[in-house]
């Protein structure tokens, strides 16, 4: 925001972010929150380098896949239930006047394509225009969002002193940008169809790419995807860190913690979401400004101040008025995400409580279950681990504690 107001040169943004991240990692509070990582780190430092690297870099693949499954399955009922609020939110974000009643009338008349000759008003069906691309987008975005957020958080915990909510905040920044960038094209298609900007034949992935590059607007398409990545990075870091805090420190249930964290994430990333929504309502053959320029344009426009000079700044009063105007449509967005992520939390509870039986393998007329085979492997691994403990204790100069998985 400071850069958007013109108070900070662009060249100082990246060094400032790096200094803040370094200070957060090296702060005493982060080290004290490690909860025993110093002891484990001291033990690992006495082991061979390969063993220590494996210990620090171990990842629970099952937990990552489970989170991806929760995000993908929970996105379907959540999107269907909350999609009308998403339609209203987009309309409120991309206009400066009117209330929710006028937004509903606009949607029921057919959106931007409602004035076409011979086109009938869709009525209530207008609230579900573009539902199929929206469900497709949510499945792609939510499954990858939950999976890679869990993976990144585990890597941050294994390679830094950060633990708990802090590791999820930092890990979700990178994973959120990557998943938001990848799913940006699906989001672009969904927004164009939901507001009636283009016809369905013009909104296929190949048509969008062909229209953008044939018009020489490939950089504008990249700006849209980059903006979607930045918005997702802010939203995901707020969501996963606060969800962990509410669930583990406050004892909230899964649906409650998911819905509450979703509302916090909406507030944190809403200005970016407004800017991205405006960028994605422009057809692919037209140019759009960058993400921070779009955020600044939204604030200046909602502040009601004419910008005479590019170096002109906003007064503090105008700044707060512009930021407040930038949150137009916040109620619809918060309600949409609370419903959507609440459904995801319900699906998460179901997946966590579900039990899966292992199939049986029939060999030469005899039935050998997988569990019996795994039991034999377990006994062999235990004997191997006992030999490994003796070898490590014999090689080490001091007694160390070794964890075998």
Image (cartoon, rainbow, N blue to C red):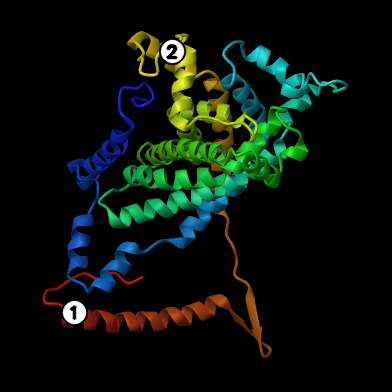
What kind of element bears circle 2? Answer: loop
Would residue 88 be visible to someone looking at this image?
yes
- The image shows residue 46 at horizontal and vertical percentages of 17, 70
> Can you name the residue that lies furthest to the left here?
397
Counting labels gives: 2
Point 43% across, 55% down: residue: 151
Identify which residue, 306 or 149, lies in the foreground: 306
Quadrant in which the N terminus appears: top left
Q: Which mark is residue 307?
A: 2
Name the image quarter holding the C terminus: bottom left
Q: Determine crowd level at label 1: few under 14, some 14-19, many 20+ residues with C-alpha closer than 10 A.
A: some
Please tell me which residue lies in front, 80 or 93: 93
Q: Nearer the viewer, residue 229 or 123?
A: 229
Q: Residues within 10 Å of mark 2 (few under 14, many from 20)?
A: few
Residue positioned 29% across, 69% down in the render: 403
Image quarter of residue 194: top right
Residue 376 appears left or right of 333: left
Q: At 40% from the left edge and 84% from the top edge, which residue is drawn?
A: 380
Instruction: Pinpoint residue 108: horizontal percent, then vertical percent.
Output: 75, 20
Q: Quadrant of residue 261?
A: top left
Residue 37 shows which numbered tag?
A: none
Q: Position of residue 14 (x, y in %)?
A: 31, 39
Q: Is residue 267 visible in the rendered structure shown here?
A: no
- The image quadrant that residue 268 belongs to is top left
Q: Is residue 287 above or below residue 59?
A: above
Q: CA distance from mark 1 to mark 2?
A: 72 Å
- Among numbered discs 1 and 2, the one appearing first in the sequence: 2
Q: Position of residue 316 (x, y in %)?
A: 33, 11
- Label annotation for residue 393: 1
């Amino acid at each position: 925001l400071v850069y958007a107001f013109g108070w900070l040169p662009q060249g100082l943004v990246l060094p400032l972010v790096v200094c803040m991240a370094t200070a957060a990692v090296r702060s005493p509070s982060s080290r004290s929150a490690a909860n025993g990582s110093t002891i484990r780190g001291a033990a690992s430092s006495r082991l061979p380098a390969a063993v220590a690297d494996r210990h620090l870099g171990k990842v629970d693949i099952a937990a990552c896949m489970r989170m991806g499954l929760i995000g993908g399955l929970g996105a379907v009922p959540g999107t269907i239930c909350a999609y009308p609020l998403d339609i209203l939110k987009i309309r409120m974000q991309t206009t400066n006047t009117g209330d929710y009643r006028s937004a509903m009338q606009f949607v029921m008349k057919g959106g931007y394509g409602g004035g076409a000759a011979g086109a009938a008003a869709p009525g209530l069906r207008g609230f579900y225009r573009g539902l199929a691309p929206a469900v497709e987008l949510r499945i792609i975005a939510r499954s990858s969002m939950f999976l890679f957020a869990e993976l990144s958080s585990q890597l941050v915990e294994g390679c830094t002193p950060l633990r708990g909510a802090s590791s999820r905040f930092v890990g979700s920044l990178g994973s959120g940008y990557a998943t938001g960038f990848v799913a940006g094209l699906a989001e672009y298609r969904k927004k164009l169809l939901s507001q009636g900007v283009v016809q369905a034949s013009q909104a296929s992935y190949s048509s969008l790419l062909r229209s953008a590059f044939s018009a020489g607007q490939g950089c504008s398409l990249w700006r849209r995807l980059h903006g979607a990545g930045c918005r997702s990075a802010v939203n995901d870091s707020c969501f996963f860190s606060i969800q962990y805090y509410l669930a583990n420190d406050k004892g909230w249930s899964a649906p409650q913690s998911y819905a509450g964290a979703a509302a916090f994430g909406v507030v944190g990333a809403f200005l970016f979401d407004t800017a991205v929504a405006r960028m994605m309502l422009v057809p692919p053959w037209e140019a759009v400004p960058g993400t921070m320029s779009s955020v600044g344009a939204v604030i200046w426009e909602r502040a009601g101040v004419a910008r005479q000079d590019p170096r002109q700044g906003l007064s503090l009063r105008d700044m707060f008025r512009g930021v407040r105007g930038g949150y137009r449509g916040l109620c619809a967005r918060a309600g949409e995400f609370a419903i959507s992520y609440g459904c995801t939390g319900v699906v998460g509870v179901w997946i966590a409580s579900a039990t899966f039986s292992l199939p049986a393998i029939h060999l030469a007329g005899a039935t050998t279950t997988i569990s019996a085979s795994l039991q034999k492997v377990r006994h062999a691994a235990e004997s191997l681990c006992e030999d490994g403990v003796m070898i490590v204790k014999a090689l080490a100069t001091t007694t160390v504690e070794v964890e075998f998985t």
